Amino acid sequence: MSVELTPSDLPQRRLSRPVEETAQRVAVHPRVKALLPRFDAPFFQAGLAGYSDGAMRLIARRHGCPFCVTEALLDRTLLNGGKGRVREDPDLIASECGLGDVDDNRAASVDDHPIAGQVMGTHPNEMARASELLLSMGYDVIDVNLACPVKKIRTSNRGGHFLRHPDEAIAVLRAVRDAVAHAVPVTVKLRRSFDDTPAMAAAFERIFDAVNELGYAWSTIHCRTVEQKYLGPGRWEFLEDLVSRSCKGPGSDGPVIFGSGDIWNVRDIFAMLDQCGVHGVSVARGCIGNPWIFRQAREMMAGREPSLPTIAEQRQVLLDHHELACVLHGERSAGQRMRKFGIKFAAHHPNAQPVKADFIRCQTPAEWRDVIERHYGAGAGGGARP
C-alpha cells in the first residue's frame, strides 16, 4: 500500500489566532484527565503499522509523549499466541529493555503507560476475547480499529472496511464494550467514511452515534476516507463540522473527539486544535523519526520557542532506538526495521541526503553504528538542521 511520508499539497489553514497563542490555551479534556491522569497534554502518538512498536514508543515517552497506541493487533493472532502476545506487552518491554522493575519504571515515569492496545478483527466474540487478553496484559485502554484501509483485509471486514457494514461494526463495538468497559476505558479509531458517497456518509454517522451511545470514552477520527488510504490531503473541515455538530464545549457531556490527519510538524498540532476544535490530536507520520515533536509541543504550551534537536541529541536517540529495537526484535530484524526510521531521522541532519543514503544501505548493527559515528560523531558539530 502506498504511504506518503511527506506532505501532499495541503490547503491553507483557517486559524483564529497564531498557533503560539493556541498552544498556551489548550488543555486535556477533563473527562480524559479523570480517566488517565498521566494523559496530561492534548496530543499523543498514534498506532502506526510497521512503526509504533515498543522501541518507538519508549523513545517518544522520553521526549514528552503522554499517551501511545500500539499497532493494530489482530484478534486471532493474539488469541493464537502470536504478535502482541509477548512482544508488545507494555510491562515486559520495559523490563527486557533494561529499564528495571515495572514498579520502578512507573515511579520514574519512564514506562510504557498509559497505553492503548489497539485490536482489529471481524467477529464480535473473538474481538471480545482478544480485548480481555489485552486487559490481562496491563493495557490502560482498549482501542477498536475501524480505520485501517489495507486492501487485503477487505474480505474479512476488518478495520476501515467495517464502515461499509454499520450493523456488523456496531456489534463488534458492543461486544468489546461489554467485555472490558467495566475495567478500563474503551475507545475507537474511525475514518470519516468508506468513500464520499452519501450512503457511506450516513453509515459513518450511524456508527459514530453508536460509539457514543455505547459509552466509548473517545473517538479518534482520521479525516481521509478508507478508499483514499494515506494519499492526498485530509479534510480538516470534516472534523470541524463534526465537532461543531456534536460538542457544546470542552467540559460538556458531548462526545470527546480526537483528530487525525496531516500532522507533519509541531505547529500542525495546534493548528488542528484551533481550526477543528478537536479535544486532542493523534500524531502519526509526523513523529516517525521525530520524537522531538512531543518535546516541542510541550515547549510551545509553556510559551517557549520549539527547539530543534542538536546533532548530539540526534545521535543519542539513534543509538537508543537501535538498542531497544535489537532487544525487542533481534539484531537482524532490527537492522531491517531501523532503515526506514533512519530515512526520517536523517531529515534533521544538516547533510540530510548523504545521511539518508547511508542509512538505506545499513544491514548490520556495525554498519548502523558506523553511519552514526561518521555523521553524528564528535566532528559532526553540535547544531541542528534549520
Image: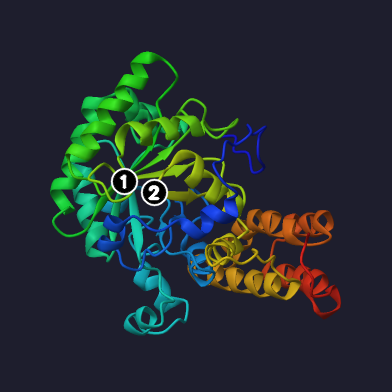
The answer to whether the residues at label 1 and label 2 have Cβ atoms under 8 Å apart is yes
Q: Position of residue 66 (x, y in %)?
A: 43, 64
If the image is split into quadrants, where does the C terminus sit? bottom right
The amino acid type of the residue labelled 2 equals His
Q: Quadrant of residue 204?
A: top left
* Coloration mode: rainbow
Q: Position of residue 85 (x, y in %)?
A: 33, 60
Specify the label residue 256 is tagged with. 1
Q: Residues within 10 Å of mark 1 (few under 14, many from 20)?
A: many
Specify the label residue 279 is tagged with. 2
Looking at the image, tell me whether mark 1 or mark 2 is earlier in sequence order. 1
Q: Secondary structure at mark 2?
A: loop
Inter-mark Cα distance, 1 to 2: 6 Å
Q: Residues within 10 Å of mark 2 (few under 14, many from 20)?
A: many
Q: Position of residue 219 (x, y in %)?
A: 33, 43
Residue at 61% over, 47% down = 264
> Relative to the observer, which residue lies in front, 259 or 26?
26
Q: Quadrant of residue 362?
A: bottom right
Q: Quadrant of residue 365?
A: bottom right
Residue at 70% over, 61% down = 363
If the image is split into quadrants, where does the N terminus sit? top right
Residue extending furthest toward the top:
198
Residue at 68% over, 73% down = 313
Q: Is residue 320 above or below residue 18?
A: below
